[in-house]
Image (tube, rainbow, N blue to C red):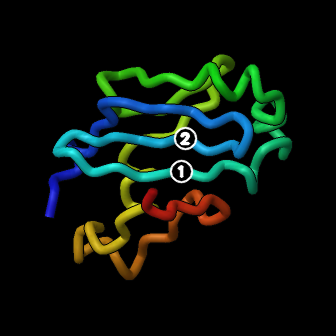
Amino acid sequence: MNAMSDHLIVNLKPDPGSFTVYLEWKGGATTRADFSKIVGDGVFQPLKDPAFFGKVSTRANGRVLTWPGEIDFGADALWFEAFPGDLPVTMRQEYTPPLTRLSFPNP
């Protein structure tokens, strides 16, 4: 199991047409984060614009996926959504995924 500090995004590729972001992680894993279920909701309203959606980047050395205006998703949360089995055993019973409306099928 990876330590939480190992969940770093090293590369990303947004697909504004489908509101997804392909993520490459330290260690070589790849995932696809589907944000289509939250686009246009509340603070996520700006993501509805494909040009804005395409402005996604990382900060904090790959620990945060971010858009302008402080729309942020922590790398650990995105990792555990994609790989729930990596959640530390001591946290599994009390953990509720914060992004349950997102889907993370592997590409």
Label 1 crowding class (10 Å Cα cut-off): few <14, some 14-19, many 20+? many
**Kind of residue at badge 2:** Val
Q: Height in image: 94 above or below 43?
A: below
Q: Residue at x 14, y 64 (%)?
A: 1
Identify the residue position indicated by label 2 in the image. 21
Left or right, residue 67 beside residue 37: left
Coordinates of residue 9 in the picture (x, y in percent): 33, 35
Residue farthest bottom in this picture: 93
Residue 23 drawn above or below residue 79: above
Q: Are marks 2 and 1 in contact (CB under 8 Å)?
A: yes
Q: Residues within 10 Å of mark 2 (few under 14, many from 20)?
A: many
Give the secondary structure at mark 1. Answer: strand
Between the residue at mark 2 and the residue at mark 1, the CA separation in whole angstroms equals 5 Å
Please tell me which of labels 2 and 1 falls first in the chain.
2
- Residue 88 lies left or right of residue 18; in this view the side is left
Which x, y percent locates residue 74? Answer: 44, 41
> Residue 95 versus residue 61: which sits nearer the camera?
61
Circle 2 sits in a helix, a strand or a loop, which is it?
Answer: strand
Q: Amino acid at mark 1?
A: Ala
Q: Which residue is mark 1?
A: 33
